[in-house]
Amino acid sequence: MSIAIADHVRDIPRSGIRDFFEVVQTMGDVISLGIGEPDFATPWHIREAAIYSLEKGRTGYSSNLGLPRLRRSISDYVQSHFGVRYEPLSEVLVSVGVSEAIDIALRALLNPGDEVVYHEPCYVSYAPSIVLARGVARAVATRSEDHFVLRAADLEKVITPRTKVLMLNFPTNPTGATMPPEELEKIAALCVKHNLVVMTDEIYSELTYDAVAHPSIAALPGMRERTVLLHGVSKAFAMTGWRIGFACAPQELIEAMMKIHQYAILCAPIMSQEAAIEALDRGEESMLKMRREYDLRRNYIVRGLNDIGLECFKPHGAFYVFPKITGTGLSSRDFSLRLLREKKVAVVPGSAFGPSGEGHVRCSYATALDQIKIAVDRIGELCQELAVNGTSAAA
Ligand code: PLP
């Protein structure tokens, strides 16, 4: 018997990143610039808080919305980092990573056929999550020569009467892009004009460099009431495996998201919630230490890639660079496959992040500097064989 899978699920392609890393796993001795997670273990004081809570026997369910104590920490953290206040008991929901928060926010908001606009290249889950929520995904391409900023003028061109939601992610995975505050203000004005709800994925918001400020759209005038702020501890605190994210939004939306969350998930794991309290309350120093290390690596990789002829702007956020590989004459997939097979370096083809990512590859610098140095040398060897000219372009 063949099982008939729902059409909209069957038609969704598997993640391009997963497919690629299945090839990587069959090979030994590969330097990976492919993974989108910190190479650091979770700071010890955070692990210890979870261990201590286990020792005390805190092993049950929590409230569906999450531990009240954690929701208070989230509310304080969001207020101090983004300047927006959310009521801990009614406007905050603790989720299983930002991943779950994206899913339940879309499912809570969309009726079949509602359109969701997002900037591309973007995180691999956005378009599939929209489709799974029965929405229609509408991408706005951003450009490398514009450092992948989302321009209000480009956004307005794709807005239709069916557009309900705008998804933002700055700093961006996979480009590291950040938004100039004046452009963010124009985007906010468009959202008010077209009555859009904004989902802002702030997962890389702590990881900004060069003293660049990262304002959240939620903090701009008139935006709190129409925004769901999504954030979590995975990236800034090196806690990907703990699976803790959160959503802050007006009560009616949190209430709707909670209904899906309580039936599908019940609650996020309690020991991870205990660890998240420690991260948000006392994790700043640990985060800053990791960020200083990312910054050194960023400086190295941007210069190294430009020197070997892969044009790469210097992003101000996240832990990715997104060099252009069009000079090699190869597609992003072919370049990545050759780099993997011939030089044993893994990067992610830009096409995995949507059609506008073609012509680029994503290199993560959440990898030790000595490994990055070897990887850049090996990428240089491949580029030499492909006769790419080094430009030493100032980044
Ligand atoms: N959003 C973005 C932009 C990401 O890059 C990622 C992970 O790579 C996620 C969300 C998922 O985060 P979490 O581990 O909190 O589910």
Image (tube, rainbow, N blue to C red):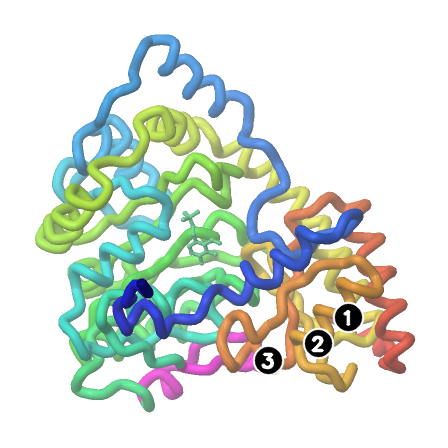
Q: Residue at x 80, y 58 (%)?
A: 344
| Percent coordinates x, y for residue 278 in the rendering | 40, 26
Q: Which residue is mark 2?
A: 334
**As shown in the figure, which amino acid type bears the numbered disc 1?**
Arg
The relative height of residue 5 versus residue 228 in the rendered view (above or below) is below
For residue 209, say whether it is visible: no
Query: Which of the image's four quarters has the N terminus?
Result: bottom left
Q: Which mark is residue 338?
A: 1
| Percent coordinates x, y for residue 213 in the rendering | 48, 57
Q: Is mark 3 within 8 Å of ligand 1?
A: no
> Residue 59's image quarter?
top left
Q: Secondary structure at mark 3?
A: loop
Part of the protein shown in magenta = 140-156
- Asked whether, in this view, residue 389 is left or right of residue 335, the answer is right
The reply to whether the C-beta atoms of the residues labelled 1 and 2 are less than 8 Å apart is yes
Q: Which residue is mark 3?
A: 358
Q: Relative to the observer, which residue lies in front, 119 or 261?
A: 261
Q: Disc 1 to disc 2, how far (Cα)?
A: 6 Å
